[in-house]
Amino acid sequence: METAYQIRNAYREEWQDAMALAWKTFLRFEADVYSPEGVKNFENFITDSTLYRMFVMGAYQMFVAVEHSRLVGMITLRDTTHISLLFVDEAYHRQGIGRGLIGYLADYLRTEVGAERVTVNSSPYGVGFYHKMGFRDTRPEETKDGIIYTPMEFIL
């Protein structure tokens, strides 16, 4: 199934929908391998009003994939070159949206920021995807505050 979607900067009014997408997808694909502490800490992160204020001020960037005005994917950046969140609606998995978001982000970082690399702390579910995108592990899997992740980087 081919989708026609657009990737662009997120609008302020899309924040809640994007965080709801992240939460729903996290619960479906991630939460079962996390401790209750990890699940709660993830929920606290995506519902933090400080994070939203940083987004509004431009200090926490979000790009979205939209199909027919429906938000189907999202990616966020913190500290200029670190992927903080990347989620695609379950109904749109394996349709190139995650790849498109990474490609859009890589182009943005190369051309607008002049960055040479991007990093991510991949969830267990995302490791295979990031490897397919060309990311490499920089350290073994870690757990902090119940959040399980593998530090990775991609050379732009």
Image (cartoon, rainbow, N blue to C red):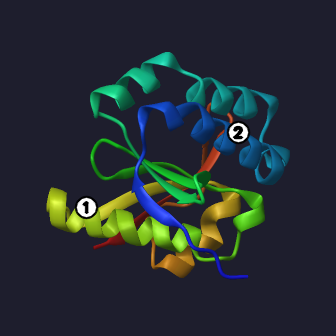
Quadrant the C terminus occupies: bottom left
Q: Is residue 132 visible?
A: yes
Residue type at tag 2: Trp
Point 28% across, 69% down: residue:
107
What is the number of the mark on residue 90?
none
> Whole-percent x and y of residue 22?
65, 44
Comparing 135 with 97, the one in front is: 97
> Secondary structure under badge 2?
helix
Q: How many marks?
A: 2
> Relative to 90, is 47 above or below?
above
Query: Is the residue marked by circle 2 packed among few (<14), some (14-19), or many (20+) residues within 10 Å?
Result: some
> Relative to 49, is 97 above or below?
below
Point 72% across, 26% down: residue:
40
Q: Dot 2 corresponds to which residue?
A: 23
> Relative to 80, is 114 above or below?
below
Circle nearer the N terminus (1, 2) = 2
> Relative to 84, is 152 above or below?
below
> Whole-percent x and y of residue 118?
33, 61
Quadrant the N terminus occupies: bottom right
Q: Dot 1 corresponds to which residue?
A: 109
Q: Is residue 137 visible?
A: no
Point 62% across, 23% down: residue:
44
Q: Is residue 131 left or right of residue 89?
A: left
